Image: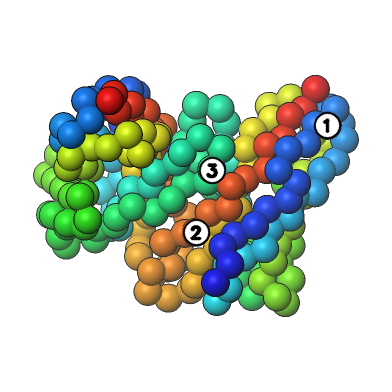
């Protein structure tokens, strides 16, 4: 059984650029959630995808968008990057139903915006 | 908005001692709580969960206590080991099976001294 894998692990962008982060969910999981974790803080919910559709969104602007693919993998896209977007972006997978909120997290993608 | 918070940002204990990490929550509608452990460079890892109709749940060396009257959650780690050194987050959600967002606290850094 493979866990959640994310890529890239680290990346550096400049303000105004766009970034795409990728996530492969754990085998058997059908739901993917994305969280933003600023340094020294707890993860903040961005959005969740289930059946290739957005299934809940946190307090993030529209320039944060995502996709889920038929194989349950997912992408997080951020447009018009701002300095405050610098953070660890965590992908988590789960299985809808009982235990849906027992998330399995990846190691994250560390984004630095200069 | 309502959120989960923590009483102490850091906790230092001696190896072999018991550790207690506390968490306060303010959303009385939350009915499912989870503790996560995050080691440096890794994503959060599930430790133990508890539903709101319970006040105590035990795992291997860990116990979670829930006091709904004062909206307080705690994680007890028995015989703390150096490998327990990490940041611990409590998280809450509205329903166990809804796949809804998790709201995380800011975390407590646990350091175990040999």
Q: Earlier in the sequence, mark 1 or mark 2?
A: 1
Give the secondary structure at mark 3.
Answer: loop
Q: Chain of mark 2?
A: A
Q: Quadrant of residue B25?
A: top left
Q: Which mark is residue A34?
A: none
Give the secondary structure at mark 1.
Answer: strand
Please identify the residue farthest to the front as the structure is shown.
B114
Which quadrant holds the N terminus of chain A? bottom right
Q: Taking the image as drawn, is residue A83 in sight?
A: yes
Residue drawn at (34%, 43%) of the image: B90
Q: Which residue is mark 1?
A: A13
How far separated are the C-alphas under marks 3 and 2? Answer: 12 Å
**Few, some or many C-alpha atoms within 10 Å of disc 1 (few <14, some 14-19, many ≥20)?**
some
Residue drawn at (68%, 58%) of the image: A23
Q: Taking the image as drawn, is residue B22 in sight?
A: no
Q: Which mark is residue B42?
A: 3
Residue drawn at (74%, 29%) of the image: A112
Relative side of B61 to B69, left or right? right
Q: Are the numbered discs 3 and 2 placed on the same chain, yes or no? A: no
Q: Chain of mark 1?
A: A
**Few, some or many C-alpha atoms within 10 Å of disc 3 (few <14, some 14-19, many ≥20)?**
few
Q: Which mark is residue A104?
A: 2
Where residue A13 appears, x then y in whole percent? 83, 32
């Amino acid at each position: 059984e493979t866990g959640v894998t994310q890529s890239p692990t680290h990346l550096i962008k400049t303000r105004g650029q766009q970034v795409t982060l990728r996530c492969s969910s754990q085998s058997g999981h059908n739901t993917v959630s994305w969280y933003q974790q600023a340094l020294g803080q707890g993860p903040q919910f961005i959005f969740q995808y289930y059946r290739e559709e957005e299934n809940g969104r946190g307090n993030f602007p529209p320039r944060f968008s995502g996709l889920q693919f038929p194989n349950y993998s997912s992408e997080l896209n951020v447009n018009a990057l701002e300095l405050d977007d610098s953070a660890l972006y965590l992908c988590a997978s789960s299985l809808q139903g009982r235990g849906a909120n027992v998330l399995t997290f990846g190691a994250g993608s560390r984004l630095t915006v200069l | 908005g309502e959120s989960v918070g923590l009483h102490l940002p850091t906790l230092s204990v001696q190896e072999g001692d018991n550790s207690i990490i506390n968490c306060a929550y303010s959303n009385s509608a939350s009915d499912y709580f989870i503790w996560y452990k995050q080691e440096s460079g890794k994503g959060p890892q599930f430790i133990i969960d508890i539903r709101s109709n319970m006040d105590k749940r035990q795992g291997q060396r860990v116990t979670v206590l829930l006091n709904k009257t004062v909206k307080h959650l705690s994680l007890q780690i028995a015989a703390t080991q150096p490998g327990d050194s990490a940041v611990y987050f409590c998280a809450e959600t509205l329903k166990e099976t809804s796949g809804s967002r998790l709201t995380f606290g800011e975390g407590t850094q646990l350091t175990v001294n040999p």
